[in-house]
Every structure is written in C-alpha cells, then in structure tokens.
Image (cartoon, rainbow, N blue to C red):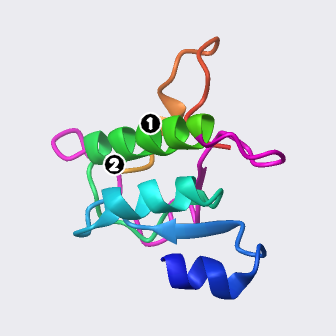
Amino acid sequence: MTELVEAAAGKLATMTYAPELPGAAALVDLMTFHGVTPSLGHTDCDDATAAASLTAAREGLESAGFDGVSSLPTVTHLFNGMPPMHHRSPAPWPPPFARPRKARPWWN
C-alpha cells in the first residue's frame, strides 16, 4: 500500500476493499493513515463485518486530520455483486442505512 501511495504522488483518493478478506483491517488503517478514503465493495461479508469495517474506516479518517479529505468512507457498486438480504444471513449493504436519522452516517 505504501508503494502504491508513493507511486500515485498524491493522486490516490479512494480505494475499494472487501472487509472479509485477510488483511482488510490493516489495509483500512493504511488507507486512512495516508488520507485515502476506504470504499467498501466487491464483498460477500455479513452485516456485522460491514458495520465494523465502516466504523473503523470512519474513525481512522476522522483521526487522520487531512485537509480536504472527507471523514466518511464510501461504498462502491452498492448491491452489485453483493448477496441479497436474507433474515438469517444479512447482507453487507443494510448497515449504512440502519443508522438513526440524527446519527452521523458511516459512509458518504
């Protein structure tokens, strides 16, 4: 990740990741450390994994302190390639919509 950020010379703004893959949490930490907005997508994770990852991404962006960088992670290709919602196996896309209206959103 560090090599990619350096090669991008300040042009890397966002990167899509799947939170259920090995190393995803460390990748989110590296992205936020470098001011890159994590974007959850192309994932087969469950709702709890999505919620925890989006929260970690938001907290990382808030603490990074980069000017001009949103403190909200994003979601890439919402619904595309993600499993449908099922009452016994919630999908990764409902958590961003489940926040109370007055609460700060997880994603942008």
Side of 66 where 83 appears, left or right:
left
* Residue for point 61% across, 35% down: 62
Residue 1 on the magenta span: no
- As drawn, the label of residue 85 is 2
Q: Which of 90 and 11 is in front in this view?
A: 11
What residue is shown with label 1? 55
- Magenta range is 64-90
Q: Which amino acid does label 1 sit on?
A: Thr
Q: Where is residue 71 in the image (x, y as percent from the top left)?
A: 66, 39
* Residue for point 70% across, 73% down: 12
Secondary structure found at label 1: helix
Q: Position of residue 6 (x, y in %)?
A: 64, 81
Side of 88 where 106 appears, left or right:
right
Closest to the camera, between mark 2 and mark 1, is 1
Q: How far apart are marks 2 and 1 (CA)?
A: 20 Å
Side of 83 where 42 appears, left or right:
right
* Residue for point 51% across, 23% down: 99
Residue 78 appears in which quarter of the rendering? bottom right
Q: What predominant SS class does the magenta segment belong to?
A: loop
Residue 72 on the magenta span: yes
Say few, some or many: other residues with alpha carbon within 10 Å of mark 1 (under 14 / 14 to 19 / 20 or more): some
* Residue for point 72% across, 66% down: 13
Q: Classify the position of the C terminus by image quarter.
A: top right
Q: Can residue 94 be seen from the camera position used here?
A: no
